[in-house]
Image (cartoon, grey):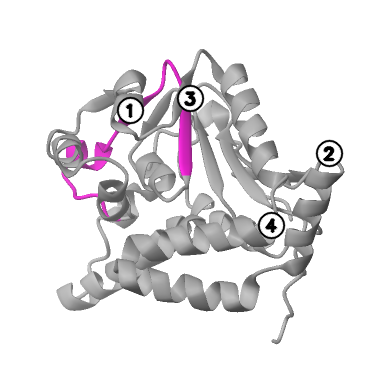
Amino acid sequence: MAYETLSLSVEGGIAHVQLSRGAAFNTMNKAFWPEMVAVFTEIEEDPTARVVVFSAQGKHFTSGLDLNDFGPGLMGTDSEPARKAEALRRSVLRMQETMSVVDRCRLPVLMAVQGACIGGGIDLISSADMRYCTEDAFFCIQETNIGMTADVGTLQRLPHIIPHGIVRELTYTGRRMMAAEARDCGLVNQVFADQEALLAAVMAIATEIAAKSPIATVGNKEMLNYARDHSIQDGLNYIATWNAAMLSRADLGEAFMAKAEKRETKYADLDPANKLA
């Protein structure tokens, strides 16, 4: 599928998604939001994909919402107030789905961030499994600075990544968090000198993940997300049931054989999903 705001390639088990409007600082225009849902649907349907790398072309990762494209719509229509509010609520829920597809993706999603990551960019990276950035990267909950409350996932997901006190400070002040601070508080795993080094390193990590059993990888993400949203006992019950059904004798056998034969493991791809409708 051709995209206006994104590009997608799948090679060696790595699905690489890129924001492709670098000249426009990868602002999130109206086309971006449904395209994100579409591209992650495409990835989910590709049985050869085992991990996702999400990066951006140009100087900045993203400057957030394209206000030139969305400005008039943010003010709503001149209809009756309750109907106007209900329509706006549905619009926000559709935008939230854009980030939720990343969170729900069965594969690990790694974000590679350079330059500015503001506004909707925080919603986006908060929905991923891991984040990496360049030394010149900075992060900002820009919604505060334009007189609104962030509503597409930042305030719901960021407190699960970094301490609440830091989330609240960033939210209430709208200040920039620079790369070194982002690393120190755990928002990003590592910081790299430039975009080239960043992408090379993230691709190397993705390659390592892609070499693991895809059944194990899918199970790992399912359990980590479930544990985030449930009690410890709920998580223990779920993994017991999951492994009772999903533990792969084939992949366990391949792991033991590869070790005995002193070679790299070679795991089969996942099966394509059955389309029932």
Q: Using the image, determine if residue 114 lies above or below residue 215.
A: above
The amino acid at mark 4 is Pro
Residue mark closest to the camera, 3 vs 1: 1
Q: Using the image, determine if residue 207 lies above or below residue 230.
A: above
- The reply to whether discs 2 and 1 touch (Cβ–Cβ < 8 Å) is no
- Tell me residue 2's x, y (percent): 72, 51
Query: Is 141 inside the magenta-drawn segment?
Result: yes
- The reply to whether discs 3 and 4 touch (Cβ–Cβ < 8 Å) is no
Residue highlighted by disc 1: 182
Q: Is residue 189 visible?
A: yes
Task: Give me the C-alpha separation between circle 2 and circle 1.
Answer: 40 Å
Residue 262 — which label? 2
Task: Give me the C-alpha separation between circle 2 and circle 4.
Answer: 21 Å
Q: Earlier in the sequence, mark 2 or mark 1?
A: 1
Regarding mark 3 in the picture, which secondary structure is present there?
loop
59 sits to left or right of 155: right
- Tell me residue 269's x, y (percent): 79, 59
Image quarter hosting the C terminus: bottom right
Q: Quadrant of residue 191?
A: top left
The amino acid at mark 2 is Lys
The amino acid at mark 3 is Gln
Residue highlighted by disc 4: 214
Q: Which residues are magenta?
A: 130-151
Q: Earlier in the sequence, mark 3 or mark 4?
A: 3
Regarding mark 2 in the picture, which secondary structure is present there?
loop
Q: Quadrant of residue 143?
A: top left
Regarding mark 4 in the picture, which secondary structure is present there?
helix
Can you name the residue that lies furthest to the bottom here?
277
